[in-house]
Image (tube, helix red, strand yellow):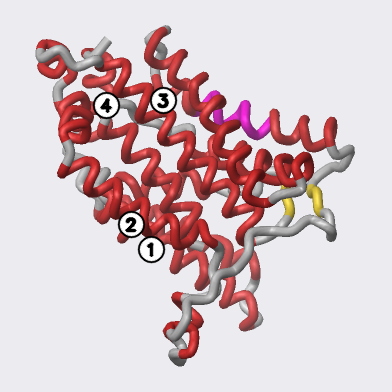
Amino acid sequence: MVTPILLAALGGALCARAGVFNVALEGLVLVGAFSGILGNYLTGSVFLAVIFAVVCVMLFSLLFGYVSIHLQANPIVVGISLNFLALGLTTFCLRAIFNVKGTYYDKNMVGLPKWDIPLVQDIPWLGGVLSGHSPLVYLTIVIVLLLHLFLFKTIVGFRLLAVGENGIAAKSMGIGIRRYQYGAILACGALCGLAGAQLSLGQVTMFTEGMTSGRGFIALVAMMLGQSSPLGTMGASLLFGFMDAVSIRLQGLSIPTQFTMMIPYVVTLISLFFFKDKGYLAEAQKTSGSSR
């Protein structure tokens, strides 16, 4: 349950580090989920379907980059617009391509395989937690570590941080502001594509209209709680993923479904009370505007 939230949150963190506040995570993940199913339908290969999803979402994210960076539109307005566009586009394509409404499911479609970790899978309780997941779950852990090293241990990472901290100063040093911002947006698209593929091919093998169910917005909060740090974002995503899993478990205890489905979003709202917004959003908007 953590993986789609964490991947999208990491993408949002990269954009924030580049001075672009990306609220289109919900739409990007939704496009990734649909593209994963479509890629599986067209190619018959689940791994090619994941690559197809990544490419499609990267192309879709370019629309956000062009409008917000080149046309200098408000990135928040653009992001919200893309969320609505993704919802309508995937619904239209679902009916136009698969000729179904609501949900597409094919019993012959194969989802992502489950990998068992030798020795670990035999450990009581712990083996069931750490073993038996899709490859994207384990890839996500690697991505968190690599992003942390990239941002805080490499020259390119330091330049990306400089772009987000002070666009004018970074530009005076000869750093290509737009190039780094576009790179962050494309990387965000790739991560959201993986998140969508995990949602539609890793957890289930089907697509439902609006199946992201607000996970993109939860990822946005996780990114903010984690202060755009890969490790901090991972910790916040673990909290929200855990509460998402708890809500599913509680449905088996004769607790009304409407109440259990509220739990992840209630926790999200509560967490915002503990989030100290030190001009984060205003600073991201100011940096994005000054870098142009």
Q: What x and y, as percent, mark residue 143?
A: 36, 51
- Structural crowding at the residue carrying mark 1, measured as other residues with C-alpha within 10 Å and reported as few (<14), some (14–19) or many (≥20): some
Image depth: mark 3 or mark 1 in front: 1
In the image: residue 207, left or right of residue 116: right
Label 2 – label 4 distance at C-alpha: 20 Å
x then y, percent, for residue 90: 70, 34
Mark 1: secondary structure: helix
Of labels 4 and 1, earlier in sequence is 4
Q: Is residue 152 left or right of residue 40?
A: left
Q: Circle 2 — which element? A: helix
Please tell me the numbered disc located at residue 278: none
Residue designated by label 3? 76
Magenta region: which residues? 80-88
Residue on which disc 2 sits: 234
Question: Which amino acid lies under the numbered mark 2 shown in the image of this protein?
Answer: Met
Examine the structure image and report whether residue 219 is included in the region drawn in magenta: no
Name the residue located 70 percent from the left edge and 41 percent from the top edge: 39
Occupied quadrant, residue 152: top left
Q: Would you name the residue on which mark 1 appears? A: 238
Name the kind of residue labelled 1 in the image.
Leu
Vertical side of 215 occupied by 156: above or below? above
Which residue type carries mark 4?
Gly
Disc on the earlier residue, 3 or 1? 3
